[in-house]
Image: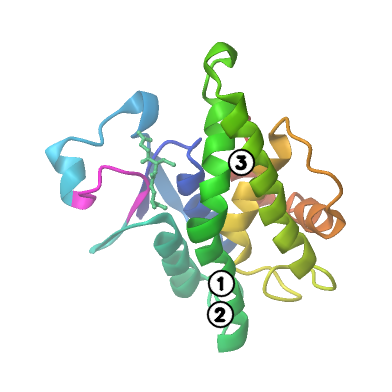
Amino acid sequence: MITVWGRKNSVNVQKPLWALGEVGQPFERKDVGGEFGGLDTPQYKAMNPNSRIPTLVDGDLVIWESNAVTRYVAAKYGAGTLWPEDPATRALGDQWMDWVQTTLLAAMLPVFWGLVRTPPEERDMKAINENAVKLVDCFGILDKALAGRAYVAGDTFTMGDIPVGAMCWRYSQLDIDRGSQPNLEGWHARLQERPAFREHIMLPLS
Ligand SMILES: N[C@@H](CCC(=O)N[C@@H](CS)C(=O)NCC(=O)O)C(=O)O
């Protein structure tokens, strides 16, 4: 049985949960991190020396880093669907997965933490507003890329939709001016038709 360690309101935990839901692979989830703590115990650090979530255990394999975990689930349990056989399609999925980590997160984190996890009287509204503009610009890049295609790597849903899709749900829930991003909105609506997206991603932000 696969075990995913991590609280369910962590976006990084939600990525592999969504992937597992897509491929219909049974798993158990253990609450650690946030209010549950438990990340600094010797037992947990033996699995994940970073004291971060998620960590996935599948038999003898222990793996961390949410996108690597998501890729593993896709490759092992979703060959031909989540994990495209065509290298070019897979590369496009990889591109958007890496883009979340290298580009999107830098704008998302100050806005998400500022508006969702910080009491109003303690918010740095200048930093939030500046990063909100950058965040909308980032999603504008994805909006343009989605013109004429149903999913980020082409006509079918793949692992590439998962990290950026999880971020897009949060983006859609933030009280910021997103303007009009019709391709992004259409793609996000398609994601919301997926049972695993509804179960693991569409949770209240706070
Ligand atoms: N790059 C790592 C980041 C992991 C990370 O920072 N996870 C956060 C939750 S989203 C965490 O462990 N926070 C500490 C906690 O929840 O207590 C990944 O993608 O897995």
How crowded pointer 2 is (Cα within 10 Å; few <14, some 14-19, many 20+) is rated as some
How crowded pointer 3 is (Cα within 10 Å; few <14, some 14-19, many 20+) is rated as some
Q: Is residue 187 above or below residue 157?
A: above
Asked if the residue at tag 3 contacts the one at tag 2, i.e. Cβ–Cβ closer than 8 Å, the answer is: no
Kindly report which numbered mark, 3 or 1, lies closer to the viewer in this rendering: 3
Q: Is residue 68 above or below residue 119?
A: below
Residue of label 1: 95
Range of magenta residues: 47-56
Where ligand 1 lies, by image quadrant?
A: top left
Q: Position of residue 126 (x, y in %)?
A: 61, 29
Q: Amino acid at mark 1?
A: Gln
Q: Position of residue 145 (x, y in %)?
A: 75, 69
Residue of label 2: 91
Q: Amino acid at mark 3?
A: Asn
User: Which quadrant is the N terminus positioned in?
Assistant: bottom left
Q: Amino acid at mark 2?
A: Ala
Q: Is residue 14 above or below residue 115?
A: below
The question of residue 112 being in magenta is answered with no
Q: Residue 131, which numbered label? A: 3
Please give the name of the residue rendered at 83% of the width and 69% of the height, measured from the top-left corner.
Answer: 147
Q: Is residue 86 visible in this depiction of the protein? A: no
